[in-house]
Image (cartoon, rainbow, N blue to C red):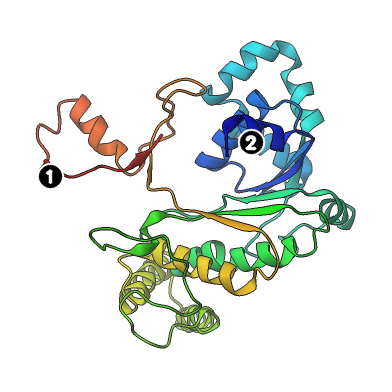
């Protein structure tokens, strides 16, 4: 699809974006507002108590960042009005239930009636995240998104953002095959998402019954995630739960048009809205920062290797 046709497609569309204050989601929202101001509505799902709190959170964690400086320069004092005309702030939590934690029935009905596109960018990307949290967002949350999407009467496409590393640590040519339900990297049988959720709940109940403190529970759940991932051939909790999220898509999508995107290492912006914007030290960024500050003087690697990054 040519870039021009993407712009045309976005015009007059209603789009739900999950994980709206996340790194990729902020970049997506900024670019849509900048290159296609005629988008109809962007519904932004954020964890917040109410729409006012959601607005404040987005202002603080997105609009107030340098990422939005080009839009600020373009719209000046009218930026808030421009944003309020195009963005609907949706307080909720996709990991809680099939209504994405959206309490307001009128708003839910509006989205089911009006949404054209859903972009699922909500994720926890920590490699060693607590298993209960990673499973809740990266896997169970995807199930909730699929169920919500099926109620949208005019939905044209659901975009599920995954990761290239669902394929684990394989070498050579890796084909973009979809995951079948309960398929594993090492061929070990028995993977079942509902059972994984049950194991998590049982472990949490056990730890709480033993009187474990929060820090101990946190470390125990991190260890559990790594252990469960390695049982089935994945190197860490993040890619394991994202792979299971893809399995959910394949199992539940039915007649929905679904696109799964598998980016590799996401780094700073390349050209737009300006070169070099990044938030925090992410993935490969620590190597660049270490080299730039002279703290990392060499790095062992394959001179013929290809570093696959997305800017």
Residue 20, percent from left and from top: 62, 43
- The quadrant of the image that shows the N terminus is top right
Which of discs 2 and 1 lies nearer the camera? The answer is 2
Q: Residues within 10 Å of mark 1 (few under 14, many from 20)?
A: few
Q: Quadrant of residue 257?
A: bottom right
**Element assignment for label 2:** helix
Q: Of all residues shown, which one is farthest toward the bottom?
A: 190
Residue 50 or 247: which is nearer the viewer? 247
Residue that mark 1 sits on? 301
Q: Quadrant of residue 131?
A: bottom left
Q: Which residue: 14% across, 43% down?
A: 304
Q: Residues within 10 Å of mark 2 (few under 14, many from 20)?
A: few
Residue that mark 2 sits on? 6
Query: For the residues marked 2 and 1, what is the alpha-carbon distance in whole angstroms?
Result: 38 Å
The total of numbered circles placed on residues is: 2
**Element assignment for label 1:** loop
The relative height of residue 4 versus residue 191 in the rendered view (above or below) is above
Residue 222 or 192: which is nearer the viewer? 192
Left or right for 99, reference 201 = right
Q: Of all residues shown, which one is farthest toward the right?
A: 106
The answer to whether any part of residue 111 appears in the image is yes
- The quadrant of the image that shows the C terminus is top left
The relative height of residue 258 versus residue 288 in the rendered view (above or below) is below
The answer to whether any part of residue 47 appears in the image is no
Residue 264 or 156: which is nearer the viewer? 156
Residue 91, percent from left and from top: 73, 49
Residue 171, percent from left and from top: 23, 60
Of callouts 2 and 1, the N-terminal one: 2
Q: Which residue: 38% across, 48% down?
A: 264
The relative height of residue 262 versus residue 27 in the rendered view (above or below) is below
Residue 113, percent from left and from top: 86, 53
Left or right for 258, reference 138 = right
């Amino acid at each position: 699809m040519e870039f021009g046709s993407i712009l045309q497609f976005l015009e007059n569309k209603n789009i739900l974006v999950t994980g709206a204050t996340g790194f990729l989601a902020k970049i997506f929202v900024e670019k849509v507002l900048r290159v296609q101001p005629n988008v109809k509505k962007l519904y932004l799902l954020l964890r917040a108590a109410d729409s006012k709190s959601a607005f404040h959170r987005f202002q603080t964690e997105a609009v107030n960042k340098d990422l939005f400086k080009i839009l600020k320069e373009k719209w000046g004092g009218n930026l808030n009005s421009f944003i309020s005309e195009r963005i609907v702030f949706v307080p909720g939590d996709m990991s809680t239930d099939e209504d994405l934690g959206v309490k307001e029935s009128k708003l839910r009905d509006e989205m089911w009636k009006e949404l054209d596109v859903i972009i699922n960018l909500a994720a926890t990307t920590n490699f060693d995240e607590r298993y209960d949290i990673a499973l809740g967002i990266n896997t169970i949350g995807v199930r909730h998104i699929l169920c919500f999407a099926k109620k949208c009467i005019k939905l044209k496409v659901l975009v599920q953002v995954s990761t290239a590393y669902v394929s684990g640590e394989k070498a050579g040519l890796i084909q973009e095959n979809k995951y079948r339900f309960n398929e594993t990297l090492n061929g070990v049988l028995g993977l079942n998402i509902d059972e994984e959720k049950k194991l998590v709940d049982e472990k949490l109940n056990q730890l709480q019954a033993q009187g474990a403190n929060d820090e101990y529970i946190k470390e125990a759940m991190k260890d559990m995630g790594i252990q469960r991932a390695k049982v089935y051939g994945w190197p860490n909790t993040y890619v394991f739960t994202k792979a299971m999220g893809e399995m959910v898509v394949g199992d539940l999508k039915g007649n929905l048009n679904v696109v799964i995107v598998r980016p590799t290492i996401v780094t700073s912006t390349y050209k737009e809205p300006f070169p070099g914007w990044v938030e925090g030290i992410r993935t490969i960024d620590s190597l660049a920062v270490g080299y730039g500050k002279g703290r990392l003087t060499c790095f062992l690697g394959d001179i013929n290797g290809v570093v696959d990054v997305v800017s």
